[in-house]
Structures are given as C-alpha cells and as structure tokens.
Image: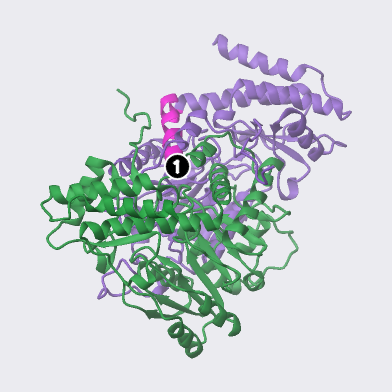
Chain colours: A purple, B green
C-alpha cells in the first residue's frame, strides 16, 4: 500500500466565512498548462486581470493587481509600503481583524493609536472623524467587513473626511469584496485590499489590491531598485526610508505589473488563471446582481435561523450580509455541533475568536457557496443536529421560513 | 463578443530555468474541490506534505512546510525571522540571486558583508571559510544553484565550518531542490528554502522551507503572539526584538503548522494540493533516480549544443546540472532568436540578467520539462532558427549528438 494516497477530498458544503467552495469553472481554469511569466500570452492575461480588478474595486486607479500570498499578504504589502517608522496610524477596531491591522502596523514601526468599539457593533463615523481631527494621523486603517463579529462599517463619510484632512485611508475589504458594494473611488479610499477565498470563490493564495496616485506618490519616495538589477554606479537611497520588505515592496511590484515588466518574483500562474476566471464569472453575473444575490440568501438564512428559535448575534443595524452570527444556545456545546455537522452532513460552519469563542457560530453566505441549495441544507442539518443533541428547536420551521423568503423573492 | 475570452493557453515547451511545465497530475490535483482550512481531512494533507518535505530536504527537522507566496517569499520569511537589526550577515555572491539575499538582508537591517566572485564561477569553500573566521558573522546566507549564471556552489565544507564556529547557515536551494542533491542535515545547513516552479514542476506560488532547532531557538526569542489572539493581560514583548513581519513570522507560522493549529493566514488550499502531488510524484520516482534523470538530459542537451558548434558559458567544473548557459554567437540577436522560438515553435528558453544580458541564453532541464522529447525539440528548433537567421551551425549535428547520449545511456 502506498504511504501517500491519491488525492480525493470529500465533497463539502462549506458555509464558513471563508475559505468557501470554489466555483467549478475556477477549478477547471487551474487545471490548464502554465505559460512562462514573460510569455506575451501570459502578460496579456495579467493585463486583463488588472482591468477586471478595476471593475471589481469600482475604481479608475491605474494600479490594481494581486499580491502573491493569502489575504493578509495584501494587508502587509500595503501597510509595509505605506508606513514609515514613527508614522502615526489611527486604527479603529471592532473585531479581530482590526487587531490584525494594528499588529501589522506596529511591526512596521508605526506610532499606532487605536479606538476600540464593543464587539458586535461598529463605529459611528462621527466618532472616527473626531478622532482623526484630534489625533491627526498620517494614515487611517480599518476593516470594512469584520468576519469575527459579522459586522460592516460604513466608510463613505470617513473616507471623505480623510481626503479633506489629507490623511491616507486604507481599507481591509477582504470579506466584502465581490459580495457587498466596495466603492473605492466614491468613498475616497486610497488603498483597498480584497480577498479571493471569500466572495470571489477563488482559492486562498492571492490578495487583490488597488491604490491610487496619492499612495503611489508616497511609496515612490521610498523606492529603491533591487541590488542585482541596479546599474553599478547608481546611488543608493539611504536605508532609512526604504520599504523594509522586498517581497511586499509595491514600488517594485508595480514595475513588474507595468509595461516595463521589471523582474521581481515569478507570478503564480495557476492562481492568476483562477483569479482571472473568478473575475470573469463575477463580471458576467454583474456586480449589482451579485450583491442582490448575497442579500437574498442572507435573508433566507437569517429567517431560517430565527424560525428555528435561535438568536442572531450583534447589532442588526450593521449586520454584514455575507456572515450570519448565531448565538449558541445555553447548554449546547458549539464545537460538538460543528463536529457533527462536518462528520455526518459534510457541512462546515465556523466558530469565532477571542471573547466570542464558544459563544457564537458564524455561517457564511459567500460567492459560490451563497446559493439556495446550501442555505436549505445548512438549516435542515443544523436543526437535526440540535435536535439530536437534545436542544429544543421549532421543528421543521427553519427550512419553511427560508422557503417563504425564496417564494416571495420569486414572486417579485 | 465577450470582452474577456475563455482561458485557452497555448501549449508550450518550457525550457527556461523556471517556471517550467507542470506535471499533468499536479494540474489535475488543483482541479479538485477545496476543503476548509481546519477540516481534519485538510490538516491531514498538511501533515503529509510536511512529511514528504522532510524526505525532499533530506532532514530530520521538525519544521518543513511551505510559505504561501512565490520562492522569494520563502527567502524573506527565513531572513526576516532570523535577522535582527544590526546582526552581521555574510553573503558570498556569484550571480543575481546572491544579490537578492543581500537586498533582503539589508532591508531587515542586517550589517551585511558581501564577498563577490566573478560571474560564471563559484567560491572555493576555503575562501568563504576564511571570510567567516575573519568577519565572525552571526549568519551566512548563500545560493546553492545560481540560475542567472548556471553554476552550483559546493556547500558541505562551508556548512561544517559554520556549525563549528556556531554561525547560522541559510541556503537558497530554490533552483536545485528536487533536481540535484540538497542534503540539509549532512551538510549542516540550518535553514533551506526551496522553490516549486523549477525542479518540482509545481506552479509558482509556494516556497517550501525547512529549518532546525538552532534556528527555532533563535526565532522563539523574537516571538510575539498576535494582537487579537492574545489574552488581554499578557505582557508585550518590546517591539525591539519582534520579527518585523506578521506574514513571514516563522514563530507564528510554526504554530499554524503544529498540532495547535493556531490561526494565522488561510492556507492556500489548491496550491497545497499541487505541492503534495508534486512531492508524491517525486518520491515515487525516487530522489536518486530523479537526480540521475536530470544529469542524463543535461548531458544530452550539452552534447547537442556543442555538436551544433555553440559554446557553453561558464566554468564547467561548477556547472549547475539543471541550467545550461549558451554563449550567444557574435552577430546574433539573442532576443530575436528567443522570439522566433516562441512564435514559430512554441518553445521558451531564457535570457539572463545584468552583465550577462544579451550574452547568453539559459536553457533549463528541470522537473517535468526535463525529458527526451523536450531536449530533442529545443535542439532541433534552435538549429533551425539560427540557420534561418543566417548563423553558421553544424547542420543536423545537435540532435544526432543528443541521440548518441540517449543510446549510450540505454545500453548501460
């Protein structure tokens, strides 16, 4: 018997806040033979991907390309390229991923100022704007959709204030991009980081970003051409201002993504195929239709959860449409329920982090996983598991409540 | 007509020093549906991949896992995690990628000392050992196989000296891993970085690394638990020694790859499938058989090139078996030849960098691309293109010379 068996992953219904099921068209794209990184056919695909990313980010920015790494590589690329040691960075935090922005910024040597909001809520934009006026940071970094708590932060007013006050505004839209509107230009966001493995339904491994000329001007002052590509006589920039990463140096990466194609890394071919296909699918569906689809299935799922007699967690006024957080009923072992869902039904839902660990389940309705079949399956299975575990639920009500939502949507 | 067409990449014969053709079994592996990152089936695949990486790296190290990014992400992860600002790092350079090690180390704040060898040669180990004794660095970082010049550096003596002198020895084996022997433990290498898109024939997008307990002990002194995962009361490590990257922090990454599975990034599922399959193929072939295959096709290619009347570039005593550098004949436009090979024959070979730009072609014989069909094709096509361009070559001799090598190999 072979020590390492043939790959044969079990089919899963993945209803977490990411990674979610990958669209089969994207899986197929990854199975195509690769092209060399400077093959004109491949650089053509790279350019097309940039064009589609501009549509996704709703921007006229020149720069829109993926970082070759998982979502947090995109966060680190932007923050490392923008933040110089000692720079003041304001970070409003309302969940785990706000802490991550603070963590990365701190490691870049930023002088960070954090605002913290109780988990389950978001900030009143006026509170953030007040802090910007008071603290006068060079950069504001915040999360658009916080998957740890299932909340979404309104950004337009904060963006306008940043622009007026000449502050750079960096937004983590990893969870929202492709599922809910992210209006880069209209909201005056200077740099946006998206994720692939959530509402785009592309595997984890790339992080699409965009940034405007305000960011570009800033990072160009920190640019240094790589040793080994430099002319011998060329003067060195003092290391003081140099971006402290080579891999995440946006001033080098944009040369690689420009017509100059200055050698940096070797682009991740199959992941680029995947991202391009995911973007094609998204543009074929259309952004508006896609956002409407995410809202419909959220409504069906939430109706089902409430119909079952369970409680939704968090302030409903700022619920993130693509993640539904469910309070784990008293006396129920949340992890045992998740394990049974996976083992018996091949359905995956998520737990949460920090103070919410053991308190809520998180159910995603993202991208290709965001469809009727999956919503009905997860509701039926969750009811069955809770019943099996002796928890009292309104039997049969969840799926019926969801079906009502779907019937009403079809009627309009 | 659709703005963005269906993906349909042209079939290519890729004979560059990477990225090279991907094994069809690896392409198929990427087309399988994904699993959630904490799904026990997926963490099982992660553990298997670690086991296979240990065999690849010929090591008993506990830590052997991929960094989610292209090859240089692996270099940066190791160097950023190891190098503290002001630390003395010795970097012997004999081609472009030695400069990259210096570039990354410099950005980490290292006090770097470089040795430079003329391109086309490598170092006498005694020269490096002398420099180690003289400079007393904390770290020596060097390239095993330099694709820019097609040379390979003997490492065993340098590794032994580093161990005796208590210096950390970091090796870039991106080009060699899986194609020529890399004996991590026998050669006393403390950290090794491999590449996927060369001799493993997996797409670019992951960088397998391994490191031993000497490295681990050092980086654990620099460890800081991520904000948002920390207990509120936990004391902070002074930022001074903290690893200045979150994405590349090996002390966090090893927690993610350990049984604790402490959340960090979301593992790149499809790329992990690809790496696992690439490693399975490698172990089925066997390391020794694989190394012998790379030597055979190198011999056939080199015989063909010389038979054609072209000259090999560089010191033959340290030729890298997986890259053959060919001097571009006087009066021949190397880029025009490459373009015609691609456009007419769908064959890709590479140019080089810096002082070698326009002087040599580089032909890879790596992984799945390293096979008889490809060697014979590239020889026949190169002869045809040179003849078409009016260059004088020994007509018909290249393919015949290669066939003789294959016949002799079959006879033994």
Q: Position of residue A129 (x, y in %)?
A: 51, 50
Q: Residue furthest bottom?
A: B134
Residue at left offset 79%, top offset 40%: A335
Query: Left or right: A363 with respect to A111?
Result: right
Magenta highlight on residue A283: yes
Query: In the rendered view of the protein, which quadrant contains the C terminus of chain A?
Result: top right
Q: Position of residue A122 (x, y in %)?
A: 62, 43
Callout 1 crowding tier (Cα within 10 Å): few <14, some 14–19, many ≥20: many
Question: Where A64 sits versus A225, above or below?
Answer: above
Query: Left or right: B49 with respect to A382?
Result: left
Q: Position of residue B158 (x, y in %)?
A: 51, 79
Mark 1 belongs to which subunit? A
Residue at left offset 63%, top offset 72%: B238
Label 1's element? helix
Magenta highlight on residue A410: no
Q: Nearer the viewer, residue B287 or A7?
A: B287
Question: Where B46 sits versus A244, above or below?
Answer: above
Q: Main secondary structure of the magenta part?
A: helix
Query: In the rendered view of the protein, which quadrant contains the N terminus of chain A?
Result: top right
Magenta region: A270-287
What is the total number of numbered labels drawn onto the structure image? 1
Q: Nearer the viewer, residue A83 or A90?
A: A83
Q: Position of residue A141 (x, y in %)?
A: 51, 53
Q: Residue furthest top?
A: A411
Q: Nearer the viewer, residue A2 or B32?
A: A2
Query: Left or right: B294 with respect to B361?
Result: right
Residue corresponding to mark 1: A270
Task: Judge whether residue A215 can be spotted in this image.
Answer: no
Task: Judge whether residue B78 can be spotted in this image.
Answer: yes
């Amino acid at each position: 018997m072979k020590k390492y068996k043939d790959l044969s992953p079990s089919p899963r219904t993945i209803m977490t806040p990411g990674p979610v099921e990958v669209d089969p068209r994207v899986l197929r794209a990854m199975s195509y033979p690769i092209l060399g990184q400077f093959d004109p056919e491949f650089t053509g695909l790279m350019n097309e991907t940039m064009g589609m990313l501009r549509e996704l980010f709703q921007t006229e920015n020149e720069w829109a390309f993926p970082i070759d790494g998982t979502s947090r590589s995109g966060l680190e690329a932007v923050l490392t390229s923008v933040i110089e040691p000692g720079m003041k960075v304001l970070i409003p935090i309302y969940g785990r991923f706000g802490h991550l922005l603070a963590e990365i910024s701190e490691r870049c040597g930023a002088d960070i100022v954090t605002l913290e909001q109780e988990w389950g809520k978001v900030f009143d934009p006026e509170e953030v704007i007040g802090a910007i006026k008071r603290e006068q940071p060079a950069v504001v970094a915040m999360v658009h959709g916080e998957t740890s708590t299932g909340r979404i932060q309104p950004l337009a007013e904060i963006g306008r204030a940043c622009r007026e006050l000449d502050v750079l505004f960096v937004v983590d839209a990893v969870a929202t991009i492709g599922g809910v509107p992210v209006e880069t230009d209209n909201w005056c966001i200077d740099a946006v980081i998206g994720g692939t493995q959530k509402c785009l339904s592309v595997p984890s491994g790339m992080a699409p970003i965009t940034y405007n000329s305000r960011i570009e001007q800033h990072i160009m002052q920190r640019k240094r051409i790589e040793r080994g590509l430099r002319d011998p006589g060329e003067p060195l920039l003092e290391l003081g201002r140099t971006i402290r990463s080579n891999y995440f140096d946006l001033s080098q990466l944009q040369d690689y993504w420009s017509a100059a194609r200055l050698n940096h890394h070797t682009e991740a071919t199959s992941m680029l195929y995947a991202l391009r296909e995911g973007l094609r699918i998204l543009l074929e569906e259309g952004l508006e239709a896609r956002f409407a689809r995410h809202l419909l299935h959220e409504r069906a799922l939430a109706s089902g959860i409430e119909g079952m007699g369970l409680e939704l967690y968090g302030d409903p006024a700022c619920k993130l449409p693509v993640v539904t957080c469910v309070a784990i009923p008293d006396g129920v072992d949340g992890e045992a329920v998740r394990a049974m869902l996976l083992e018996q039904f091949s359905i995956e839902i998520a737990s949460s982090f920090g103070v919410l660990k053991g308190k809520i389940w998180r159910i995603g309705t993202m991208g290709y996983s965001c469809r009727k079949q999956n919503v009905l399956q997860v509701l039926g299975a969750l009811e069955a598991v809770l019943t099996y575990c002796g928890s009292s639920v309104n039997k049969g009500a969840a799926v019926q409540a969801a079906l009502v939502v779907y019937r009403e949507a079809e009627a309009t």
